Image (cartoon, rainbow, N blue to C red):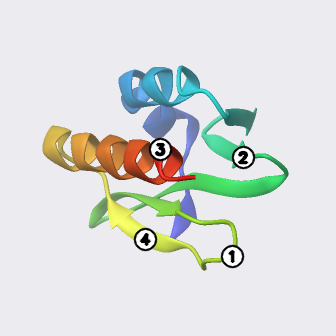
Amino acid sequence: MKHASQSTLVELSELLDHLRSIEGLVEKRPGVFYRRSKAFLHFHEDPAGIFVDLRLRSDDPFIRLRVTSGAERSDLIAKIERSLGST
């Protein structure tokens, strides 16, 4: 599974804009977000769709979630907001 291409990031522009608005997240490179000094999430693509690798807590490993559909993207935002709100 390869990292998301520029065209995929354009497809994700609404989601990326939302992530950029979340306090505590910093976009170090297009589509690569950090929380404090630790990688928090980044995107991948393959024929099965678009995926995000997400680290909900700084000591946890990344989990991979599908974010191809609008519902999946909404679920991602909800997970992130719950995670950031709990710290």
The kind of residue on which mark 1 rests is Asp
Identify the residue at horizontal 47%, vertical 44% (top origin): 85
Q: Label 4: how many residues lie within 10 Å, few (<14), some (14-19) or many (20+)? A: some
Res. 85 mark: 3
Between label 4 and label 1, give the one nearer the viewer. Answer: 1
x and y percentages locating residue 71 in the rendered image: 14, 44
The kind of residue on which mark 3 rests is Gly
Identify the residue at horizontal 37%, vertical 22% (top origin): 14
As displayed, is residue 50 above or below residue 15?
Answer: below
Residue on which the image places disc 4: 64
Q: Label 1: how many residues lie within 10 Å, few (<14), some (14-19) or many (20+)? A: few
Determine the secondary structure under disc 4. strand
Front residue (pair 21, 31): 21
Between label 1 and label 2, give the one nearer the viewer. Answer: 1
As displayed, is residue 18 above or below residue 79?
Answer: above
Res. 59 mark: 1
Distance (Cα) linking label 4 and label 1: 16 Å
Distance (Cα) linking label 1 and label 2: 14 Å
x and y percentages locating residue 19 in the rendered image: 50, 31
x and y percentages locating residue 84 in the rendered image: 52, 46
Distance (Cα) linking label 3 and label 2: 16 Å
Between label 3 and label 4, give the one nearer the viewer. Answer: 3
Determine the secondary structure under disc 2. strand
Residue on which the image places disc 2: 34
Determine the secondary structure under disc 3. helix
Distance (Cα) linking label 2 and label 4: 16 Å
Distance (Cα) linking label 1 and label 3: 17 Å
Point out the tag, 4 or 1, that comes first from the N-terminus. Answer: 1
Point out the tag, 1 or 3, that comes first from the N-terminus. Answer: 1
